[in-house]
Image (tube, rainbow, N blue to C red):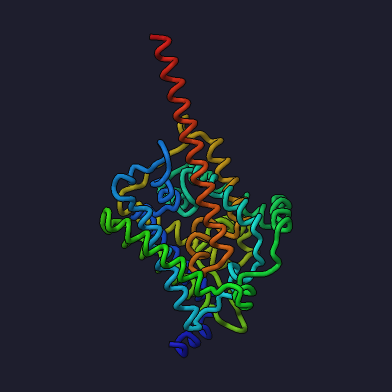
Amino acid sequence: MIEQLDLLREDYGTATLVVWGGFLIGILFGLIAEYSRYCARSALAEWAPGSERSSTATDGRPRSKQYLAAVLVALVGTQVLFVSQNIDLTQSIYWSVPIRPLALIAGGLLFGAGMVLAGGCVSRLLVLAASGNGRSIVTLLVTGIAGYATLRGILSYPRIWLENAWSLQTSPAQVYEAGTVSSYAIAAGIAVILVVLLGLLVRKSGLKGLLSGVAVGLVVVAGWAVTGIVGADDFEPTQLASLSFVAPAGETIQYLMIFTGDTIRFSVAVLGGVLLGAFAGALVGRRIRLTGFTPDNPLARYLAGGLLMGFGGVTALGCSVGQGLSGLSTASVSSTVAVLAIAAGGYAMMWIRAAHNETAAQSEASLAQMNS
């Protein structure tokens, strides 16, 4: 296997293999996500109050089972790759970047609130955009521009301030090497929690949602394998990574604008593959629908959601997929903090919107009674 991989590297180049691998992974994710309607926001909405609670909550919370299964499979698969020394997680951003609690918490809260305002996490918006949803297209553009501005532009100033305001100056890898905390203990703890929660949900309402979640988790593992095994070349090294969508959205926009002066990367190839896979799935399933903004879905809300997701996703080092799947699969302390913050921000925004909708409904009812 290794000899064959070396031959392919010699014939085509490591970077080319990684890009094509990322593109195929993106297509798979797009097909799975489009067919199964995978979305971390929907999973959270199944536990939310009032009108924000998903209509699927009455069907045994399939989105929750889907997300939990995806994280569990991604965690187990990634840890197997790590323990077998096929990948080195110390080279990923989730282990190598210093732990910055304030940035992780603030970024996570903002991203969570943004994905609720935008009506979906970035991965879901990619799928909807590929099927003709104009609101998602606009939101993705805003998210990508805001994300890139946070990474390298004017919004980097508040991000850097948040990072420096509270930084532990040690990375998760250094914490694990010092023996203060074991990454295996964190991985085992996350796995136990996931198994218990999945067991409770499955016992109550069956297996619906599990298979698509398993498939999503395997795609995340494939991402680590492509960058960590196929991309393991001393002369042409590849940054160890898996699925993530906020910063890559900005990188993709930049790539399209300066195509002749830029080189395609794994993250850009994955995002392009997701769009193609989702479009193909929607086309075959006859789910292409051209939609735009309406009074119930105003432009301002989606712009705000895109801005919050762009800034929050980069500041928290990832989105509901970048941290919620890829990050958690590494058992990183930073990822655990970021994911809890994303969930808290999303739930809080759902609660606020539910309270606002209830107040508005009461006002309309009172007005109608007065006029009757």
Q: Is residue 17 visible?
A: yes
Q: Is residue 217 left or right of residue 97?
A: left
Quadrant location of the N terminus in the rendered image: bottom left
Rendering coords of residue 14 (x, y %):
54, 79
Q: Is residue 182 above or below residue 159?
A: below
Seen at 53% across and 85% down, the residue is 10
User: Position of 250 compared to 195: left or right?
Assistant: right
Note whether residue 277 is visible.
no
Label count reads 0
Write down the quadrant of residue 45 in the picture: top left
User: Quadrant of residue 266 in the image?
Assistant: bottom right
Q: Nearer the viewer, residue 151 or 78?
A: 78
Residue drawn at (49%, 82%) of the image: 86
The quarter of the picture where residue 76 lies is bottom left
Q: Residue most toward the front?
A: 180
The quarter of the rendered structure image containing the C terminus is top left
Residue occupying the far bottom of the picture: 3
Which residue occupies 34% across, 46% down? 57
Query: In terms of depth relative to the viewer, which is nearer, 41 or 1?
Result: 41
